[in-house]
């Protein structure tokens, strides 16, 4: 868990999150004050000055992120396993970007995001090739939920994020019901505020907007890809055109995820 700085700026990478999770794994055995003290001491052993202040600020953001992660809305139960998992992954990325900023979030969660894309690709391939009758039967039984849970466990190896997702409570269930039943933004905000408070309602509304923007951007790119494929270009030229559209529409750290969601891997 080596941390470093360059020109009085913290170099953010996954080691910082590993350090946080190492001490957070003692929750239940140690109290919050002890964990906070140990994390700050561990940061101070490797950093000082401005980089240390930056790391401590990210630590506070990470605690906020963990609390809000459990409240993320889920997709409707009648959606496919692939759609439900994609919805959750997209919501989580939006929350990360909102709390940490895009650059810091991309560095902290780079591995998770790559695993998200690969998991979605594998699941999409499975659902496409699965016999329709078998798929319908699975969707009408509790086996579908079991399969989804198995996939989450395998993909994240019981990571903290997955455990948080599994620990649904009464408040989460109420927020999910609002997500599925209310299309009016004002009504949804009022209902969320009554359950989780105005601050949480504002954050969830921001997530709604970010998720919608992301979906619109992804849909536009997929339409561009289809238009390129219909031009009957050579394989090399077609790939060049697709890569150009990808580079223009998305930052490099999102390319793998976009390719997976668009069936380009």
Image (cartoon, grey):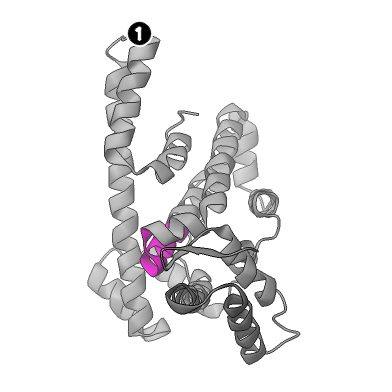
How far across and how far down the image is residue 252, in percent? 39, 41
Front one among 65 and 37:
37
Q: Which quadrant, please, contains the N terminus?
A: bottom right
Q: Which residues are magenta?
A: 92-102
State yes or no: residue 94 in magenta. Answer: yes
State yes or no: residue 88 in magenta. Answer: no
How far across and how far down the image is residue 257, in percent? 46, 42
Front one among 223 and 93:
93
Q: Would you place residue 61 above or below residue 77 in this image? A: below
How far across and how far down the image is residue 115, in percent? 58, 46
Q: Would you place residue 147 above or below residue 94 in this image? A: above
Would you name the residue on which mark 1 appears? 234
Q: Main secondary structure of the magenta part?
A: helix
Front one among 207 and 190:
207
Q: Residue furthest front?
A: 7
Residue plotted at (58% across, 76% down): 43
Q: Is residue 159 visible?
A: yes
């Amino acid at each position: 868990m080596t941390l470093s700085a360059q020109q009085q700026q913290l170099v953010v990478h996954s080691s910082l999150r590993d350090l946080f999770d190492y001490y957070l794994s003692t929750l239940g055995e140690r109290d919050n004050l002890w964990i906070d003290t140990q994390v700050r001491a561990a940061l101070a052993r490797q950093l000082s000055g401005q980089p240390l202040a930056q790391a401590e600020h990210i630590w506070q953001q990470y605690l906020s992120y963990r609390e809000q992660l459990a409240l993320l809305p889920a997709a409707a139960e009648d959606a496919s396993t692939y759609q439900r998992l994609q919805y959750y992954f997209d919501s989580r990325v939006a929350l990360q970007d909102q709390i940490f900023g895009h650059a810091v979030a991309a560095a902290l969660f780079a591995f998770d995001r790559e695993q998200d894309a690969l998991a979605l690709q594998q699941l999409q391939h499975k659902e496409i090739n699965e016999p329709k009758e078998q798929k319908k039967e699975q969707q009408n039984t509790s086996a579908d939920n079991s399969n989804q849970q198995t996939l989450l466990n395998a993909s994240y190896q019981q990571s903290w994020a997955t455990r948080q997702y599994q620990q649904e409570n009464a408040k989460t269930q109420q927020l999910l019901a609002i997500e599925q039943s209310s299309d009016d933004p004002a009504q949804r905000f009022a209902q969320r505020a009554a359950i989780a408070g105005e601050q949480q309602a504002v954050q969830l509304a921001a997530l709604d907007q970010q998720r919608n923007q992301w979906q619109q951007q992804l849909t536009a790119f997929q339409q561009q890809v289809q238009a390129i494929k219909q031009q009957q270009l050579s394989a090399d030229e077609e790939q060049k055109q697709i890569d150009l559209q990808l580079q223009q529409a998305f930052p490099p750290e999102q390319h793998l995820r976009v390719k997976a969601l668009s069936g380009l891997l």
